Image (cartoon, rainbow, N blue to C red):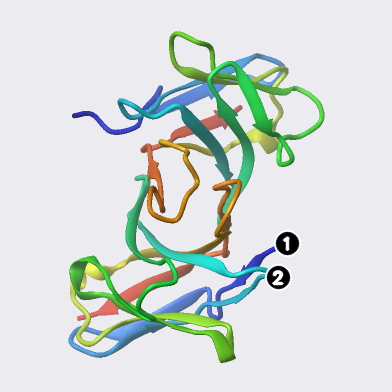
Amino acid sequence: AQSVTQLGSHVSVSEGALVLLRCNYSSSVPPYLFWYVQYPNQGLQLLLKYTSAATLVKGINGFEAEFKKSETSFHLTKPSAHMSDAAEYFCAVRVIFGNEKLTFGTGTRLTIIP
Amino acid sequence: NAGVMQNPRHLVRRRGQEARLRCSPMKGHSHVYWYRQLPEEGLKFMVYLQKENIIDESGMPKERFSAEFPKEGPSILRIQQVVRGDSAAYFCASSSGTGRPSTNYGYTFGSGTRLTVV
């Protein structure tokens, strides 16, 4: 079975500052990892994904994440926060083969301070 | 090229009524996943369906909940005799479902149905 832990249910950063959202995973088999963003009263939008190719993954809106197997982490970063980045962010994991079922973390709500 | 369509967007039901949530997958997709998001929580997997088959229902509550994906038409998530604890956002996702690494990852989610039980 696989699981995801997101450290920090709420994160606040100043506009222009570095964004760092933490995600650690547990999986008995090689995983695929994802970050999704959810704006209020909307569905989930895929930000980026790790699929066992490059360990540094670039996504939309200037976000990127690095897969670190030794640390079982997949932290999401953005060099400079923008007001439009305020949203809820979810990390998710699935196994490489078989069922495409995703296991989600509990989410991190990102607030941007003007 | 419409994405995953869910309707209704908002649904209000009184306790004891039935709720029917519909999901039309993306064109060409034959695999559908349902997730539930309770307030202040992440998404929890409920059920995975292919056309006319339930593949994995390990996340479905044992009673009152059922899902189908008929040969024609949308996938339906049905909740009988709703209770206040069923109030949540229900999301559907679809994929082409081949499962191989070279194909789909991070399938597309619909905008969800927000169920409120009063």
Q: Secondary structure at mark 1?
A: loop
- Give the residue displayed 56% in from the left and 53% down from the top: A102
- Give the residue displayed 28% in from the left and 33% down from the top: B3
Q: Is residue A71 left or right of residue A35?
A: right
Q: Which mark is residue B73?
A: none
Q: Is residue A89 above or below residue B28?
A: below
- Give the residue displayed 58% in from the left and 54% down from the top: A97
Q: Is residue A18 left or right of residue B10?
A: left
Q: Secondary structure at mark 2?
A: loop
Crowd rating for badge 2 (residues with CA inside 10 Å; few <14, some 14–19, many 20+): few
Q: Is residue A44 above or below residue B64?
A: below
First reached walking from the N terminus: tag 2 or tag 1? 1
Q: Which residue is mark 1?
A: A1
Residue B87, image quadrant = top right
Of all residues, the one furthest to the top in this rendering is B72
Disc 2 and disc 1: Cα gap in Å? Answer: 7 Å
- Give the residue displayed 38% in from the left and 49% down from the top: B103
Q: Which residue is mark 2?
A: A28
Type of amino acid at the residue the image marks with label 1: Ala
Given residues B67 and B13, the one toward you in this image is B67
Q: In the image, residue B76 lies at what x, y percent?
A: 54, 19
CB contact under 8 Å: marks 2 and 1: yes
Which quarter of the rendered picture does the C terminus of chain B lie within? top right
Q: Is residue B80 above or below residue B29?
A: above
Type of amino acid at the residue the image marks with label 2: Ser
Q: Is residue B54 above or below residue A87?
A: above
